[in-house]
Amino acid sequence: PSRLTLRLSPWLQVMSSESESQPEGLGGTTRLQKQFLSDSNLADYNPNPQQFLPPNDADHGTQGDKLVIAMVGLPARGKTYIANKLQRYLSFFHGAPTQVFSVANVRRKKYGADKPNEWFSADNQEGEAQRHVARLEALNDMKEFLRAGMERGRVGIFDATNATRERRQWMVDELRPILQSKSHIIFVESVCDDEDIIEHNIKETKLHMPDYEGKDQDEAVLDFKQRIAIYAQNYEPLSEADKQFSWIKTVNGGQQVVLNKIFGYLPGRIASFVMNLHTAPKTIYLTRHGQSEYNLTQKIGGDSSLTGHGQEYAHALANYVHANILSSKPRARLWTSTLKRTIETGAHIRHEEVEVDGGKWITMRPRQWHALDEIHAGIFDGKTYSEIEDIDPEEFKMRKQDKLGYRYPRGESYLDVMARLDTIIHELERQRDPVLIIAHQGILRIIYGYLMWNEIEARESCPHVSIPLNTLKCLRPHAYGCDCKSLTLITQNTGDDGQTEVLDPPSH
């Protein structure tokens, strides 16, 4: 045998001695194996090791590219909603530094929010000159952002009507010096001819738009419709005449989607995401499972069942769903992970066959997603944090220093989980009915952080968000953020019966 084989023999013995206690199919290095490597001279045989793991989908950004997404469409078509959603999705689930540049925000800052509709007419020379100044300032801000760094590429989202071909060509010409090619500009047009959707969008815009703050709703709606009519006079939708550009056209909230010259991985993900977006109002309910046996013993991970206190919450949740969701929204949906504690938490919710819009429907039909399973703690699964600190203080310290990027040995990191939640976010955005998600704190932190972009600025904050037990979070997204109401369905159960709620049970 070679010298290397002889020197590896103790290592192979360590591997063999530990194989019976380690789960099959998992790679990685145990503390005993790491200690052996540290004490030996095997490192001499790898004098130039690879220093870093390659990034996964949640952290590769744009692979160094500069990309511009330019919104197109009349007012009240959901452009700002799509722009803000894209910004959150690309920065959260792909790690791409992304920023929205709103011409309307610049216009309000420079000239005030309260402008008469005549000011928006193309025939109003003063108004047109001032609006061009606002466009140019927003575009220059975006150029500065794109030039500022290339660590993972950058995405600028230009939120404006961009309603004419002349305007779109001007934008392409302005950006030509700093982009690799014109295919790095993707126009995203939102078209809507459904009067009900337009009416909803107008009312939602009025409720949150600074232009109509403090105004009577009926008066604001009428005024905004007049503004739309002014823009419509010169509107030129994307069509065959624009075939030289890359663009995505979504009609009536994704009922029809047209793609033109969309190439590459990230543009493909953008197209997939946009086709799932719509502005129809919906409520998303997030809740952790009820108290589990591992919660009670301070263990992380595992696949334990609920305690008696956890079952109490499961009943309280079912009562709330029956009285407050299914009573008015029978098409509501139920998603859980594949782990017992989430399935048991939703077990008392009724799944009845009802007639909805002339068809049969199963209320709260349960759907189990592996993607909603808790972060896998690898070799530390089923351990308490104090045990982990005793077993491997170095790993314990590394996790505290970088909770977002830290990966459990043979397990996952938050970034790994973000990569698998990408699919869930696409499905969640597609839904038009209420969705109740029963999952785990680590998972819900990411979903909550993504939706609450007006409260949580960066994904680095997600691992520190508190999602308490026995609490239902009711979220309602809109163009300018997301509203959230938290409901405590049962209070803390105190006593010496072993079923007392742990105030802050360990979680990833």
Image: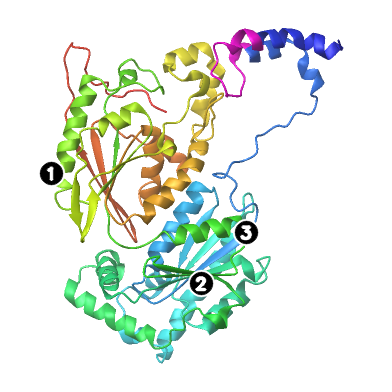
What whole-number distance in Å separates the C-alpha atoms at marks 2 and 1? Answer: 51 Å
Q: Residue at x 48, y 15 (%)?
A: 389
- Name above or below for residue 118 compared with residue 458: below
Specify whether residue 438 is in view.
yes
Q: Label 3: few (<14), some or many (≥20) within 10 Å?
A: few
Give amino acid for label 3: Gly
Residue assigned mark 3: 264
Q: Label 2: few (<14), some or many (≥20) within 10 Å?
A: some
Quarter assignment of residue 51 = top right
Residue assigned mark 1: 323
Give amino acid for label 1: Ala
Specify whether residue 453 is in view.
no
Q: Label 1: few (<14), some or many (≥20) within 10 Å?
A: few
> Which disc, if any, is residue 137?
2
Q: Residue at x 27, y 65 (%)?
A: 204
What whole-number distance in Å separates the C-alpha atoms at marks 2 and 3? Answer: 30 Å
Look at the image and tell me in which quarter the C terminus lies: top left
Give amino acid for label 2: Glu
